[in-house]
Image (tube, rainbow, N blue to C red):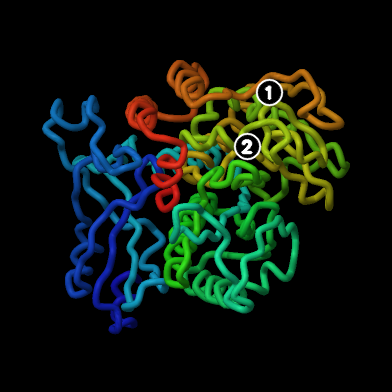
Amino acid sequence: MMKNWLRKHPEVRTIRVAAADLNGQARGKRIPARFAEKVVTDGTRFPMSVLNLDIWGEDIEDSPLIFDSGDADGVLRPTERGFIPMPWLEAPTALLPIWMFRENGTPYEGDPRHALAAVLNRYTARGLTPVVAMELEFFLIDDSGKTLQVPTSPRSGRRRKAAETLALRALDAFDTFFTDLYDMCEAMDIPADTAISEAGLGQFEINLMHGDDALKAADDAWLFKMLVKGLARRHGFAASFMAKPYPDYSGNGLHTHFSVLDANGANIFSNGGPEGSAALHQAIAGCLAAMHDSTLLFAPHANSYDRLVPEAHAPNNVCWAYENRTSAIRVPSGSVSARRVEHRVSGGDVNPYLMLAAILGAALMGMEDGLTPPPPITGSAYALDLPQLPTTWDDAIDAFDTSTVMPRIFPAELIRNYVLTKRQEQRYMAELSAEEQVEVYLDTV
C-alpha cells in the first residue's frame, strides 16, 4: 500500500522520514521520492543516540549510547501509518513516520512510540482496548519583535490584546488559517473536531476526536503539532504549544480523555449510573498513584512549571472529582455509557507518546492492583490540603529518576535516557534568562 501511494502521487518529488525523539522532536532525513521504495522495503538507519538528544538537538554528554557503544545504529522502519502529505510545505512532499528497532529486529526500548505500544500490548493481552481523545491548546504569536504579542488579524489589521474565551470573533479573525488547518488535517487523516478560542492572548484549542487506536491518537497529536507550527509560519506568524509563553495568562494544556472497552466492545468504566464502575475508580486510583512520579512527562521543560501554579487553570495537586476542572483527574458528566476519565495535568509541550503511555500505564496498574482512590473532592482543589505535584523541574526529575512506579510502565533504558536528557537541559537552561528560555521553546515544543 505504501508503494502504491507513491505511484498515485507522482507530484511528490521528495519525502521526509522521521521518528519522534524523547522530546517529541521529529528526527530524520530528506530523500528523493525515486528512492523512497527502498526505505519502505529496507528501512533506514541512524544512530540510536539520535532519539536521545536534548532540546537543542545536541548529544547527551554522558550517554552510554555514544562513545561507550561506538554510537551504534538503529534500524528505522515505517510505521503502519504509511505516507502522509506535508501540505504546509511549498512543494508537494510526503512524510513517512518511522520507528526504531535493534539490528536483531527487536524494538529499541529508547523509542517513545515503542514505549506506548508496549503499554497497549498489555491491554490487548487482557482483552481490553483504550479509547482516547485529546484536546490540544496552542498560541498564535507574532514573534517578529523583541516582545511576543498576538498577531494582527488578517481581517482587521488590528491586535486584540485581551482574553477571548469562546469568542467567535477570535476564531473569525483567523478564519483563513483555521480553514487551511482543517483542510490539511483532513488530508493528513488527523481527526480535528471542535475549535474554540481560549483564555490566553491568541490562544486556541482544537479537539481531536476519540478513537480506539491509542497509538494513532498519539501519532495524530504529534503530527498535529508539526502541522500547526508549519502552517502558522506559512501564514506569517508563529504557533507554539509551549506551556507558558505569557506569564500573566493561562498556559497551554493537553487534556486527555480515555475509557476502556472489553472484548465485546462495552465500556468497562460504565456501570449504568453517574458514579461509574469499580474499574473506573481503580483506573483513577492508578493515575493518582503514579501522578507525582510521572509529572516530568506531563511537564517536561523548565517553562512547564510556570503553568503548574495555583489558580492558573492547571492542576498542581493530586486529586480527582466529578465535573470539576480544578482537579487533576475529572470525570465528565454526560451519557453514562460514555463514562470516561479526563487527565488534566499535561502541558501542550509534552511528547504525546510518553504522556499517553504514562496515563494508560498508570490506569492499567490501578486495575491490575485493584487500587481504591481517595474520595472525590468538591469545591476548589486550590483551597484544599492535598498531595502536591512537584513544583520545580529539579524535583520532578528526581521523582521520575527514583520512582518505584515508573519501571512498571517504562523500560529501564528509556528512564535512564530521559533522566540524562533532562539533567543536561537543566544545566544549560540555568545559564539562560526566562526570555532566552522562551526563545528556545517557542518553535521547538
Instruction: Tell me residue 346's x, y (percent).
Output: 58, 40
Q: Quadrant of residue 268?
A: top right
Q: Position of residue 301 (x, y in %)?
A: 46, 36
In terms of sequence position, does the residue under pointer 2 or pointer 1 come before the other? 2
Image coordinates for residue 194, horizontal then vertical, percent: 68, 64
Q: CA distance from mark 2 to mark 1?
A: 23 Å
| Of the two numbered discs 2 and 1 in the rendering, the one whose residue sits closer to the viewer | 2
Name the residue carrying label 2. Answer: 345
Going by the image, does 345 lie left or right of 215? right
Marker disc for residue 430: none
Residue drawn at x 73%, y 35% as measured from the top left: 311
Q: Residues within 10 Å of mark 2 (few under 14, many from 20)?
A: many
Residue 200 versus residue 117 in the image, above or below: below
At 74% from the left edge and 23% from the top edge, which residue is drawn? 373
Q: Residue at x 53, y 65 (%)?
A: 190
Side of 412 relative to 195 (left or right): left
Expressed as whole percent of the image width and height from the top left, the position of residue 220 reads 50, 58
Query: Which three-letter amino acid code belongs to the residue tagged 2?
Result: Val
Q: Which corner quadrant of the image does residue 382 belong to?
A: top right
Q: Which residue is mark 1?
A: 370
Amino acid found under the numbered disc labelled 1: Gly
Residue sitting at x 69%, y 34% = 328
Indicate the secondary structure of the residue bearing disc 2.
Answer: loop
Examine the rendered structure and indicate whether residue 304 appears above or below residue 144.
Answer: above
Q: Nearer the viewer, residue 61 or 237?
A: 237
Number of marks drawn: 2
